[in-house]
Amino acid sequence: MTSTLCNLPAKPAEEAQKHRQQYEEMVAQAKKRELKEAQKRRKQLEDRCKLEESIGTAAQTWNQEILPNWSTMCTSRRVRDLWWQGIPPSVRGKVWSLAVGNDLNITRSSSCTDLRATSQESAMQRLATRGQPQVKAQADKLYNICLSRAKEKWRTTAAPAPEPETEDAGSSDRESSLELIKLDISRTFPHLCIFQQGGPYHDVLHSILGAYTCYRPDVGYVQGMSFIAAVLILNLDTADAFIAFANLLNKPCQMAFFRVDHSLMLTYFSAFEVFFEENLPKLFAHFKKNNLTPDIYLIDWIFTLYSKSLPLDLACRVWDVFCRDGEEFLFRTALGLLRLYQDVLTCMDFIHMAQFLTRLPDLIPGEQLFQQISAVHMTSRNRKWAQVLQALQKDPERGSPVLKR
Amino acid sequence: MAKQYDVLFRLLLLGDSGVGKTCLLCRFTDNEFHPSHISTIGVDFKMKTLVIDGIKVRIQIWDTAGQERYQTITKQYYRRAQGIFLVYDITSERSFQHIMKWASDVDEYAPEKVRKILVGNKSDEVDKRQVATEQGIKLAKAYGMDFFETSAFTNHNITETFTRLAEQVLAANKKDLDLLRMSVNDEINLAALEEEEGLCDSAAGDQGKGCWC
């Protein structure tokens, strides 16, 4: 910089001076940039430390104060507030399990001789209905019974049997359940590369879904379940994941959707529309004008509890509050998302909205989303979600005319 | 502002789970292929604009979940379609046998003048083939449909299949099209026409939007 190539004439002093000055300016600027970046990095590190510290403190609070006194504390204001902020990953599974509960009373029968003496089927029914405190080993037992039955089925269906020409639709659906599970496992969070063939959780996911179809053959496997089971597996050990899975799917809203009780689903959509219109009248009108009905985007969101549509960490936060507030929160989240994106949505046509909502942006600002969700009012003319839903159930004629044939 | 398209219609992808509906679509609209796709829950959407006979045709494609349980839901979408792809997997006899059921559901729930096309996907997997090409041809003939064997993996016959169905839908709506040709620069007429004929119920909203197009 200070000298030119030797075969060129020397720079005039003035020019050399100018170049030196430019060089120094450049160096100064580079230094400034570096300093700024160093500051930014330090700030990021501090933020991360702060975040980790707060997660650590929160985890301690959950572990030492809340979890040991669950039944008395879980409804307190302080715990609810802490809950809203997101459950620390280390206690998330425990809190979900406790909050989802075990209404199915998945426990072991009082004596093992019972199990041996009777067919597995009836033993399972008793396992499922007897009201005893949940003990870990007992849960394992039921899970293992269901799993061994599933494995038996896999063995018998693995042999290539000629397909009967005249199978009725229902039985073929159930028959193909096990096949469909296999197909779907590799299509569950493929980017995580842990549920795919050869991945560490492939067999666990396979087992839980298979066990469930044996536990509840009346429901069977329905696409979307693999995502729910996968999220539970990521947060709980296998037997607990199975109990939480079975109990979660047993909730009224989930049962309505996974059994595809169409009229009840329409009732849920109508209730959603009541709050949609109340909260976002302009966007609601825009959707109506474009004939964009809620089924188009809600089905994916509700079936997979947002685990397919939101980034996983954000989906887990939605699950946190869903475990606290119940089905209402799923619909509140939907309204939060619509609220967050209402400006972009308002200037889209049908296909662009449909594409946008069925494939949300990769980067969704979590804090902003939760701010929007908290701004959603879940009362309509003094009625809460459950009341609106109940009223619609009694009088389905008041439901959305758009969704009816 | 130049019109982005002259005609808009909806095509629907139907067929058993795992036959490759989403892969066909991704290949057609984005020229991409992912071997391990995420399962479709409910319905997904894509769109593409083609030029056929000098007419700008925007097609919305509704990609449905294949599991039987979902059909209660997806059947509601049949009536909104002008064209339907019936897709099976040449390596799955079962998916081929189910085409009959899919076709009869379409007869029941889709509009009468809906156009259908039969697609045997995964034609690259020759070693695993369970359904002979002749079987596909025969079935398509019985239903009066066109037939293509495709491979989303090798990009075989993808554009051909989508274009063929689009052409057929255009032909089926020829009366409307002739009117359209006479008034090709008249947007108001077009919008009115589409609404009247049910060719598109959101044409007005779709017209000339600046953002996200």
Image: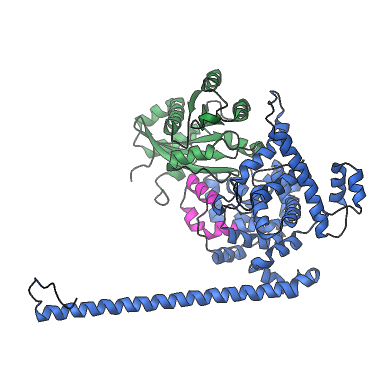
Chain colours: A blue, B green
- Residue drawn where x is 55% and y is 28% of the image: B129
In the rendered image, residue B189 lying in the magenta stretch gets the answer: no
Between residues B12 and A399, which one lies in front from this camera angle?
B12
Side (left or right) of B5 relative to B91 = left
- Residue drawn where x is 54% and y is 49% of the image: A358
Q: Position of residue A382 (x, y in %)?
A: 70, 61
Side (left or right) of A244 relative to B73 = right
Q: Is residue A395 visible in this depiction of the protein?
A: no
Q: Is residue A319 above or below residue A114?
A: below
Q: Is residue B172 visible in this depiction of the protein?
A: yes
Numbered disc total:
0
Side (left or right) of A323 relative to A354 = right
Q: Position of residue A99 (x, y in %)?
A: 75, 62
Most common secondary structure along the magenta stretch: helix
Residues drawn in magenta: A335-363
- Residue drawn where x is 78% and y is 49% of the image: A144
Please identify the quadrant where the C terminus of chain A is shown: top right
Give residue B132's quadrant in the image: top right
Q: Position of residue B163 (x, y in %)?
A: 42, 31
Q: Is residue A24 above or below residue A404?
A: below
Residue furthest left as drawn: A9
Side (left or right) of B36 relative to A3 = right
Please identify the quadrant where the N terminus of chain A is shown: bottom left
- Residue drawn where x is 54% and y is 73% of the image: A48
In the rendered image, residue A345 lying in the magenta stretch gets the answer: yes
Q: Is residue A51 above or below residue A200?
A: below
Q: Position of residue A78 (x, y in %)?
A: 71, 74
